[in-house]
Every structure is written in C-alpha cells, then in structure tokens.
Amino acid sequence: MIEIYTHEWKTVSARLAEAMRDGKISVEETCAAIIPVLDLLRKVFPDEAEFPARQGEYYHLDSQLRRAGQAYRMALELDPPLTLTEQEAAAIRRHCPLLLTTQAECFPLKDVAAVHHPTRPLIGYHLFWEDDFDFPDDYEPCDHEEIWVEYDPEEKTVTGVMTFFHSSVISSEEAVLEARDNGERPLVRIEWGKHGSLLKGWENIHIPLKNMTMQDWMRQTYEHVKAGGRLPQHPLKRFWPRGFEGSYESYIDFSVAIDPLFYLERKPLMFKSLFANAILFTHAIPYNFHPKMEWPDRFTRALLD
C-alpha cells in the first residue's frame, strides 16, 4: 500500500506545485499547505537544519514572525553560524559592490548586511531600502534586495556577479570585467523606487521566466511608475512621490553613487552561514523584511525542475 500512497502523494504534489506557479493558490494558502509538511519533516529528521530554516521562511512569508523566529533559531542551533576568517572578512570589504542610483531615487538605503557562504568563495550582499514604491501594503518597512559576488581567494579577483532581479537570478560577464576596472568592486545600477539591481550590459540581458529583456522590463516599469505604480491612492503613499517625474533617459541615468561599504564599516553586519534569512532575522535586521532566495543555486535548481 505504501507504494500506492507515495505515488499518489507525488501526483498530488505536482498538481499543487503547478497551481502555485499558475497563481491559482495564494501565498497564504501556499504557506498553510507547506508549513505542516515541514513540521512533519522536522520530527522525522530532527538533526537537519534545512527543514526548520525553510519552515521559518514560510512563517516569515505568512507574517507569523514569532514562529518564524523560533524556527530560524532552531535552524541556527542545528547548524550554527561560523566565524569569518580574516581573509573572508577582507574579501567582503574588498569586493563590496558600489551602487549607482538615479538622481530622483526616493527611498534611502537603510542597512546593508553581508553573508559569506560557509563552503564557497561566495558573498551575499543584502540591501535594505526604506520601501518599495509598488508595495505600501506589505507590512514590510523595507525593500530587501540581493547581490552575490563570487571571487577567487588566491587571486583576490571577482569571478562572478549575480543579482536577484524581480524573482530571477541575473548574471553578467560584463559586470565581472567592469569590477576588474573598478578595483575588484562590482558596479550595480539600482532601479528607481523598486530597487531592482541591474548589471553592466543589462539592456540586452534576458530575464529568466519573464520572456523579455531587461530593457523591455525597464520601459514597461517606467510607464507603470510614471503613472503612479501599484495602489497609487494608498494612504502610506501620500508622502511619497506621485510617480516618477522625468524622461525614460533620466529613469535609466544611474549617476548617483552609494557605497554600501560605508554601512558595513559603520555597522559590520557580516556573517558566515548557509541560512541567510535565519541569520538576518535573528542577528541583523530589527524590522520585518521579505525573505529572499539565500543563494543563487536555489533559483537554478528551480529552473531545472
């Protein structure tokens, strides 16, 4: 009988996943479905940190913050954060990206945290902007964005640059070459109000899952935010700009530099852990934020599924 049940479980799970991808199931319904499964997995595999870490993310997405914190703490008890070596801390500073915003950017950068991968020369830089122009109603008083920098520890050079651009991982070889010309620090352009992170050569980069280039995306988003964006009448937006004011050329004029290294020097939120959301939630950021994909390979695995 167990063979029948496991086969049917796979079939039901596949249909459920398809419905999630098609938007037939809400985020809240997704969390309600998956959290009990992860609870069972935690009981069956009590020594594996992945399951409480993932459960923490789903509680977090569902705004059950106390339960998220409990699950995240359990994950870090099972797989404690490691101490950064001097070389890793130096790499975080050496390869910290430089941000380029537009003149009209309406939200300041609040915090920056860096998480070094425990086994690979890979650093996740987590940016927390004051808010997202399209989401005044998400009860997250910030906009969480990610940049990953891969490096050669022997040569002390950047070997890869990736960003999490509106739910897709974006990479660019041009960004690596640009970093070489900028003292091994990548340059990352920041989308007005929404803070999507664009890399060198972004105009011709194809966005996975969206069937369009970043140039197409930016032109569409420009018209969207120029018209007031999502929920233009929301009460929290009454002190925000009514929309982007200016030409498309000014919308993509990334000429104002912001240095996240200044933030890391002032408040060194630097860690070494596989579970970035857990470490950020429990050790770094004192306000609610949206949990993101911790490392780019999670997105890659999803694409291959």
Image (cartoon, rainbow, N blue to C red):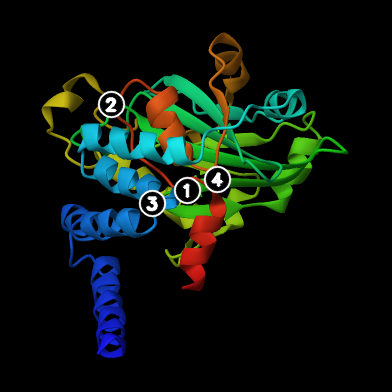
Q: Which residue is mark 2?
A: 141
- Element class at badge 3: loop
Q: Position of residue 145 (x, y in %)?
A: 45, 37
The one of 34 and 163 positioned closer to us in this rendering:
34
Question: In which quadrant of the rendered image does the N terminus lie?
Answer: bottom left
**Which residue is located at x 37 percent, y 23 percent?**
106
Q: Which residue is mark 1?
A: 165
Q: Which residue is mark 3?
A: 46
> Residue 29 vs residue 72: left or right?
left
The amino acid marked with disc number 3 is Pro
Label whose residue precedes the other's in the sequence (1 or 3) = 3
Q: Quadrant of residue 155?
A: top right
Is residue 197 shown to the viewer in this render? yes
Q: Is residue 22 above or below residue 119?
A: below
Front position in the image: 24 or 154: 154
Callout 3: few (<14), some (14-19), or many (20+) C-alpha neighbours within 10 Å? few
Residue that badge 4 annotates: 163
Looking at marks 3 and 2 on the same chain, the residue that comes earlier in the sequence is marked by 3
Q: Residues within 10 Å of mark 4 (few under 14, many from 20)?
A: many
For the point 55% across and 52% down, the residue is 296
Image vertical order of residue 257 relative to residue 205, above or below = above
Percent from the top left, x then y, of residue 303? 49, 68
Q: Quote the CA–CA distance across marks 2 and 1.
A: 19 Å
Q: Of the residues shown, which amino acid type is indicated by label 2?
A: Pro
Q: Quadrant of residue 12?
A: bottom left
Compute the Cα span from label 4 to label 3.
33 Å
Residue type indicated by callout 1: Phe
